[in-house]
Image (spheres, grey):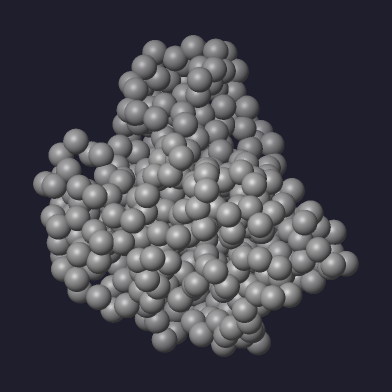
C-alpha cells in the first residue's frame, strides 16, 4: 500500500496543453495510407484525408502536430509540394525506404488537416539541405497577407487568406541526419536562418531550435550560450530502445517481464534528461523563457516481421501504454520548462496511436492513454507527496507508481495513476487535502496479459473500461491498481 498526499490548493502552474502533441512524418505509411488516401480513394475521406483516422484523432483534441519530419524535413523542399498535384515533383524518399514520394500531401494538405483537427501546426524547416531563402519564402507563402510573390502564389494555388502559423522548427537533428553539424556551427546557422523566419502580417512565430540528442549536454550548453536569446524553444529527442542496441532493439510484442522491466527503466531516464538539460538552460535563461520541446519521444523496436525495414512499422502493447503514461507524468511534473512534446509518430510508425491496414483502422493502447490524459491539458498542476514502493526485477529496482494530478477550470480534480509492475497490484490511498470531494469516477486501462495489443481482427482487446471499486470516504480516496495498468479518475466537489 502507498499513501499519497494530494494538496488541492497547491498551484504548481498550468500544464501546457502542447505536452499532448503528436508528430507526423513522411515515413513509411504515416502520411500516405495512414493520414492521406487522396480524394479518389475508395476509403471514405474528406478532401483526401481518411475519415476514420480523422474522427479518431479529433476525439483526442490534439493540441499541436509536427510535420514533415524528422529526418525527412531536412531534405524536404516545400515548393515541390504545392500547386496542381499532377504537376508536383516526384522524388525518392531517400531516408525512409527509398520509395517514391509524389508530394501529393504538401503544405496546403497539412494545414487543412490541422484545421480539420483543430490543432496548431508545427512546421519543421529545412536547415540541413535547404537555403535561407527557401525557408524565408515558406513562411512568407504561408503567413503573408498582402502583395508579394509568395503570397500571390499561395492565392493562385487556392488559398486566399494566409494561415496562422505559430510553431516553426529551424532544422531537425542537425547533429545527425540534418547535416552532422557541431553545436558551434549549428548555433551560427540557427542565428542566420532564424533571422529570416519573419513575423508577417501580425503572425507571431515561436521559433524552435534543434536541441540535443538524449544526453548530449554539450550541445545544449553551446546552443543555449550562442543562440539562446534568438529562440523560444529548444528540442530534445529521446527514444526508448529496450535493449539499448540499435542493431537489435527488441521486439514490440511477444516479450517477457525482463524486457518489460528494461523498457520502463530506460524510459524513466527522461526525467534525468529534463532535469539536467534544464539546469544548463537555467544558466543562460534564468527566467525560464525558453521551453524544452520534446518533439520526438516514444518506443523504438525492431520493425514488425515481414515489413519494409525503412518504414519503422511497429505494434503497440500495454507496455507502450504504461510507458506513455510515465512520460506524460514526467512532462506534467516539469511543466515549468516542458512547453511541448510530440510522440513519434502519429500513425503506422513507431509508438503510433493509430494503425491502419487497407480500409481497416485500430486504436492502440497508447491512444487510450492520450484519451484518458486529455483532462490535464491547460489544467493547474497539483502537488503530490508520496514515496513510491519499488518494483524489483533481478538486482534492479524502479518506482512502481507514477502519478499526475491537476485541477481544471471547473474545479474538478483529475488524477492519473499507473502501475509499472508487470506482476503485482498496488493499493493506493490518496489523502485529498483542502479539496471539496463528494464523488469520484474513473476509467481503467488494463489487460490480464501485460503484452496484450489490438489487432485488425481483434481491435478491442485493450480498451478502457469504467473503473469500479473507487472508494471515497470523507477526504480519503482508495483504489487498487492492477499490475501493468493505467487509471484516470475525477474527483468532484
Ligand atoms: O522518428 C524517426 C526518426 O528518428 C526521425 O526522422 C529523426 O528525427 C529521428 O532520428
x and y percent of residue 245 in the render? 37, 81
- The answer to whether residue 274 is left or right of residue 1 is left
- For this rendering, which residue is in front, 277 or 330? 277
* Residue 148 in sight in this render: yes
- Looking at the rendered structure, the number of numbered marks drawn on it comes to 0
- The answer to whether residue 74 is left or right of residue 12 is right
- For this rendering, which residue is in front, 489 or 120? 120
x and y percent of residue 491 in the render? 55, 22
x and y percent of residue 25 in the render? 54, 67
- The answer to whether residue 170 is left or right of residue 470 is left
* Residue 444 in sight in this render: no
The residue positioned 61% from the left and 49% from the top of the image is 114
Image quarter in which the C terminus is found: top right
Image quarter in which the N terminus is found: top left
The residue positioned 38% from the left and 65% from the top of the image is 133
x and y percent of residue 299 in the render? 47, 66
Identity of the residue furthest to the front in this view: 147
- For this rendering, which residue is in front, 314 or 87? 87
Q: Quadrant of residue 97?
A: bottom right
The residue positioned 25% from the left and 75% from the top of the image is 181
Q: Is residue 460 above or below residue 310?
A: above
The residue positioned 81% from the left and 58% from the top of the image is 45
- The answer to whether residue 484 is left or right of residue 190 is right
Identity of the residue furthest to the right in this view: 42
Amino acid at each position: 500500500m502507498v499513501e499519497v498526499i494530494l494538496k488541492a490548493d497547491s498551484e504548481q502552474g498550468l500544464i501546457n496543453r502542447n505536452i499532448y502533441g503528436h508528430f507526423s512524418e513522411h515515413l513509411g505509411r504515416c502520411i500516405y495510407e495512414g493520414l492521406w488516401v487522396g480524394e479518389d480513394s475508395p476509403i471514405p475521406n474528406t478532401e483526401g484525408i481518411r475519415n476514420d483516422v480523422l474522427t479518431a484523432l479529433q476525439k483526442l483534441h490534439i493540441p499541436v502536430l509536427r510535420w514533415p519530419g524528422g529526418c525527412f524535413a531536412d531534405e524536404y523542399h516545400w515548393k515541390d509540394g504545392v500547386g496542381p498535384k499532377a504537376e508536383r515533383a516526384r522524388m525518392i524518399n531517400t531516408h525512409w525506404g527509398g520509395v517514391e514520394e509524389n508530394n501529393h500531401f504538401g503544405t496546403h494538405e497539412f494545414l487543412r488537416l490541422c484545421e480539420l483537427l483543430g490543432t496548431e501546426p508545427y512546421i519543421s524547416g529545412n536547415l540541413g539541405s535547404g537555403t535561407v531563402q527557401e525557408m524565408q519564402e515558406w513562411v512568407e507563402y504561408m503567413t503573408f497577407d498582402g502583395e508579394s510573390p509568395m503570397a500571390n502564389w499561395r492565392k493562385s494555388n487556392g488559398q486566399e487568406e494566409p494561415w496562422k502559423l505559430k510553431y516553426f522548427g529551424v532544422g531537425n537533428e542537425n547533429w545527425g541526419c540534418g547535416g552532422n553539424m557541431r553545436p558551434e556551427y549549428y548555433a551560427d546557422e540557427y542565428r542566420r536562418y532564424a533571422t529570416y523566419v519573419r513575423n508577417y502580417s501580425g503572425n507571431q512565430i515561436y521559433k524552435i531550435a534543434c536541441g540535443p540528442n538524449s544526453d548530449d549536454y554539450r550541445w545544449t550548453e553551446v546552443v543555449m550560450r550562442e543562440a539562446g536569446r534568438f529562440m523560444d524553444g529548444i528540442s530534445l529527442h529521446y527514444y526508448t530502445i529496450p535493449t539499448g542496441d540499435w542493431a537489435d532493439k527488441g521486439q514490440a510484442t511477444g516479450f517477457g517481464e525482463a524486457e518489460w522491466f528494461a523498457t520502463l527503466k530506460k524510459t524513466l531516464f527522461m526525467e534525468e534528461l529534463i532535469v539536467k538539460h534544464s539546469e544548463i538552460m537555467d544558466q543562460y535563461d534564468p527566467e525560464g523563457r525558453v521551453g524544452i520541446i520534446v518533439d520526438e519521444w516514444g518506443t523504438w523496436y525492431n520493425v514488425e516481421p515481414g515489413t519494409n525495414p525503412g518504414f519503422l512499422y511497429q505494434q503497440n502493447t500495454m507496455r507502450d501504454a504504461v510507458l506513455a503514461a510515465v512520460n506524460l507524468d514526467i512532462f506534467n511534473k516539469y511543466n515549468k520548462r516542458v512547453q511541448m512534446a510530440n510522440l513519434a509518430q502519429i500513425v503506422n510508425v513507431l509508438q503510433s496511436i493509430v494503425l491502419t491496414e487497407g480500409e481497416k483502422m485500430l486504436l492502440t493502447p497508447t491512444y487510450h492513454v492520450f484519451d484518458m490524459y486529455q483532462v490535464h491539458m491547460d489544467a493547474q498542476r497539483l502537488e503530490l507527496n508520496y514515496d513510491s514502493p519499488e518494483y524489483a526485477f533481478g538486482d534492479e529496482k524502479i518506482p512502481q507508481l507514477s502519478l499526475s494530478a491537476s485541477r481544471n477550470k471547473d474545479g474538478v480534480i483529475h488524477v492519473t495513476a499507473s502501475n509499472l509492475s508487470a506482476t503485482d497490484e498496488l493499493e493506493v490511498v490518496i489523502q485529498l487535502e483542502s479539496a471539496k470531494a463528494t464523488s469520484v469516477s474513473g476509467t481503467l486501462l488494463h489487460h490480464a496479459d501485460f503484452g496484450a495489443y489490438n489487432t485488425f481482427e481483434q481491435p478491442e482487446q485493450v480498451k478502457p473500461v469504467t473503473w469500479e471499486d473507487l472508494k471515497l470516504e470523507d477526504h480519503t480516496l482508495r483504489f487498487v491498481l492492477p499490475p501493468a495498468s493505467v487509471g484516470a479518475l475525477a474527483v468532484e466537489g
